[in-house]
Amino acid sequence: MHSAAPTFLDALAAGSPLVLDGGLSNQLEAAGHDLRDALWSARLLADRPEAIIEAHLAYYEAGAGVAITSGYQATFEGFARRGIDHDRAAYLLALSVELAREAARRAEARSPGRTLWVAASAGPYGAMLADGSEYRGRYGLGVAELERFHRPRLEVLAAARPDVLALETVPDADEGRALARAVRGLGVPAWLSYTVTGDRTRAGQPLDEAFAVAADADEIVAVGVNCCAPEDADRAVALAARITGKPVVVYPNSGEEWDAGARAWRAGSPGAFSAARVTAWRKAGARLVGGCCRVGPDVIADIAAQLN
């Protein structure tokens, strides 16, 4: 008899870190795609799906074991503003999972023996607004209203059978609570990752309070931070592990800073993903490690070399 193929939860429980990919948008921009659009990379789901496959494939081939889909800014409400009806929007949401799965199949075919995973991205309410609200939180909505916003999209994504749901770039503990409720009963594990400044969420709540949201949520199998400065991730990893007792997910930005006036990235501190830093994250409890904005395949290759 053949043993069953390992699941994502099996891989997570095995203890060895899983390498996440880097920024999907910067990889698409590097390939020449213009993402200056309210739908951001989600626009290419309809316009250039093959480009998304190629971007995922670049990260898999760099050593990532997990690709995060292009669904971050894909919502029924956002698509509706572009004249895309509910059924077509649901198709595009499911397509975001299938494109990453196709990239995984191609990468596995090129490197037999690898097992690769797909994380379906679900960004925060503020991502749908496309006005930077995901870096502020406090939308003026209650937990119940936010749960009603997130649940329909998560149902569609879960039905597409990703290996895990990536509830990511969450700026507000209240939205974390809403997401913990919204994933109940979907049958797909999820991670919850906040965007933070210092020891607080972007909305200003203490991180111990924010991480505690996930402590008793069985569907949430990992908790941590993304889309933040690497030094803020340093402080968060050990705290997330201590508060929740769960594996930690960490994928910060490159260390560069966005200059809103000049509309350009400014160089950050060197060593954002140094071997010492990545090793420290691992020792503190990180089991899912990658990068977010401005982190490309070269950095992911370095992380993979450090962790494998």
Image: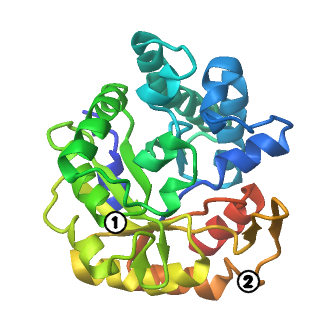
Image position, residue 214 (x, y; %): 22, 64
Q: In x, y percent, where is residue 119?
A: 45, 44
Residue 108 x %, y %: 59, 37
- State the count of labels: 2
Where residue 223 is drawn, which disc sits there? 1
Horizontal side of 156 relative to 115 (left or right) equals left
Front in this rendered view, residue 135 or 240: 135
Disc 1 marks which amino acid? Val
State the image coordinates of residue 42 (x, y, percent, origin top left).
60, 32
Report helix, strand or loop for mark 2: loop
Residue 209 in sight: yes
The answer to which image quadrant residue 258 occupies is bottom right
| Residue 245 appears in the rendering | no
**Labelled disc at residue 271:** 2
Q: Residue furthest front?
A: 140
Q: Which mark is residue 272?
A: none
- Seen in the picture, residue 168 relative to 235 is either above or below; the reply is above
**Measuring 29% from the left and 50% from the top, which residue is drawn there?**
141
Q: Residues under labels 1 and 2: Cα distance? A: 24 Å
Relative to 34, is 162 on the left or the right?
left
